[in-house]
Amino acid sequence: MAEWVRACDFKSLKPGEMMDFDFNDKKILLVNIDNTIYASDRICTHAYADLSMGFLNAEEKTVTCPLHMSVFNLNNGNPLNLPAKEPLLIYKTKIDNNSIFIFV
């Protein structure tokens, strides 16, 4: 059953930064772009690579996998180039009492 889970303090994830977050068996990537929080699966859908070690393009709202350079849209999880073909799972986020929550 899905629930809202507290991930971290809002102040601990500054604009232009990425952070990893684990909850149960889920590995989640948190991203702050202009104080909007995005959350997605953290592991690339092509090969096992941690996207929190990748490259953020805040202007394009994308993250690039550090292993094979697949680029993912943070709004919808879709890969924008090969070799990744499958989208990332995207999670709803909210900020409440200066904390970031993820619906997982």
Image (cartoon, rainbow, N blue to C red):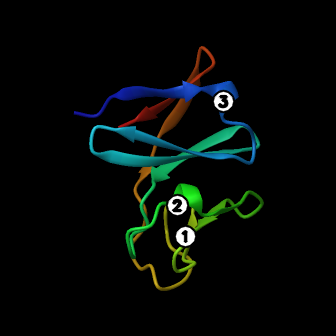
Q: Secondary structure at mark 2?
A: helix
In the image, what residue type sits under mark 3?
Ser
Q: Quadrant of residue 13?
A: top right
Q: Please tell me how crowded label 1 is: few (under 14), some (14-19), or many (20+) other residues with Cα within 10 Å.
A: many
The numbered disc on residue 29 is none
Q: Which residue is mark 1?
A: 65
Q: Quadrant of residue 104?
A: top left
Residue 74 visible to the viewer: no
Q: Are marks 3 and 1 in contact (CB under 8 Å)?
A: no
Q: Nearer the viewer, residue 25 or 85?
A: 25
Q: In terms of sequence position, does the residue under pointer 1 or pointer 2 come before the other? A: 2
Expressed as whole percent of the image width and height from the top left, the position of residue 59 reads 78, 60
In the image, what residue type sits under mark 2?
Leu
In which quadrant is the N terminus drawn?
A: top left
Q: Image check: 96 left or right of 102?
A: right
Q: Secondary structure at mark 1?
A: loop
Q: Are marks 1 and 2 in contact (CB under 8 Å)?
A: yes
Number of marks drawn: 3
Q: Is residue 26 above or below residue 55?
A: above
User: How far, Cα to Cα, is label 3 from label 1?
Assistant: 23 Å
Q: In terms of sequence position, does the residue under pointer 3 or pointer 1 come before the other? A: 3
In the image, what residue type sits under mark 1?
Cys
Q: Quadrant of residue 24?
A: top left
Residue at 55% across / 70% down in the picture? 65
Residue at 40% across / 35% down in the picture? 103
Q: Is residue 80 above or below residue 94?
A: below
Q: Which residue is mark 3?
A: 12
Expressed as whole percent of the image width and height from the top left, the position of residue 86 reads 38, 73
Residue at 45% across / 34% down in the picture? 102
Q: Which residue is mark 2?
A: 51
User: How far, Cα to Cα, is label 3 from label 2?
Assistant: 19 Å
Q: Secondary structure at mark 3?
A: helix
